[in-house]
Amino acid sequence: GAGVSQSPRYKVAKRGQDVALRCDPISGHVSLFWYQQALGQGPEFLTYFQNEAQLDKSGLPSDRFFAERPEGSVSTLKIQRTQQEDSAVYLCASSQSRDSGYTFGSGTRLTVV
Amino acid sequence: GDSVTQMEGPVTLSEEAFLTINCTYTATGYPSLFWYVQYPGEGLQLLLKATKADDKGSNKGFEATYRKETTSFHLEKGSVQVSDSAVYFCALKGPYNQGGKLIFGQGTELSVKP
């Protein structure tokens, strides 16, 4: 597609529930990033893929967070046993290469109740 | 570690006023610097960038100059419009981090009144 697509746009989860957030990057983009944006804050880096390889997951806040990109295209961010502090907007971005500009998706707003 | 600090918002201006949003950074080496804009309900969009000291990035009437001596990258526009109302994020990309992840400031909300 023309841009980075994320789904769902909004997700309400009960505390303890598992969620999966999807990112469809721009076709052919090698690099894919996930960011977490809490209310009123700037985005914070979670993890980075180059094709199917997860090269940096230093920003994942706990082992409840897991990301994959098995075929080097679509990526899924999974959060197990959600907690209230996981409530945030989760942003996905892709780029053609390390030095190219990023294109961000509109994000998934996760609310844990 | 690397970090970015922006002036706090919200900033409220009248149309045609002059805009400055301050941004300072801390980084190892010589990072690339960016301003992103987020309109309501939309994703982040790159507004402008500068990759080395004294470079000036510009786009849509906005400008920012990479000042190494003051570790700053302040955003300016001479005459704002109502359509500029958005949240603005300053960000850096360190020269050494793998993959080129961005480090963002906390954002500054701009509201322009007619």
Image: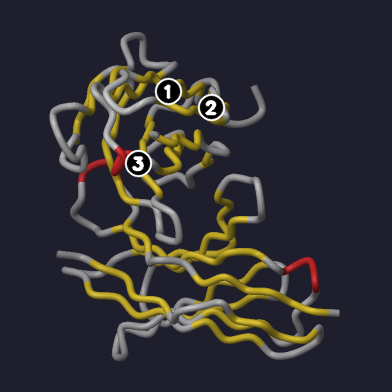
Which corner quadrant holds the C terminus of chain A? top left
Secondary structure of the residue carrying numbered label 3: loop
The reply to whether callout 2 and callout 1 are in contact (CB within 8 Å) is yes
Residue type indicated by callout 2: Gln
Q: Quadrant of residue B112?
A: bottom right
Which disc number belongs to residue A30? none
Q: CA distance from mark 2 to mark 1?
A: 8 Å
Tell me if A89 is positioned left or right of A10 in this view: left
Q: Which residue is mark 2?
A: A6
Residue under label 3, please give it.
A98
For marks 3 and 1, the one nearer the N-term is: 1
**Which residue is found at the position 56% from the left and 64% from the top?**
B48
The N terminus of chain A lies in quadrant: top right
* Cα gap from disc 3 to disc 1, whole angstroms: 24 Å
Q: Element type at marker 1? A: strand
Mark 3 crowdedness (10 Å alpha carbons): few <14, some 14-19, many ≥20 = some
Provide the chain ID for the residue under circle 2: A
Q: Position of residue A80 (x, y in %)?
A: 25, 21
Instruction: Place residue A16 in its image quadrant.
Output: top left
Residue A90 percent coordinates (x, y): 42, 38
Residue at position x 35%, y 63% from top? B92
| Residue at the limit of the structure toward the right, as seen here | B114
Query: Tag 2, which secondary structure?
Result: strand
N-terminal of the two: label 2 or label 3? 2
Q: Which residue is mark 1?
A: A21
Are tags 2 and 3 found on a single chain? yes
Q: Is residue B47 above or below residue A84?
A: below
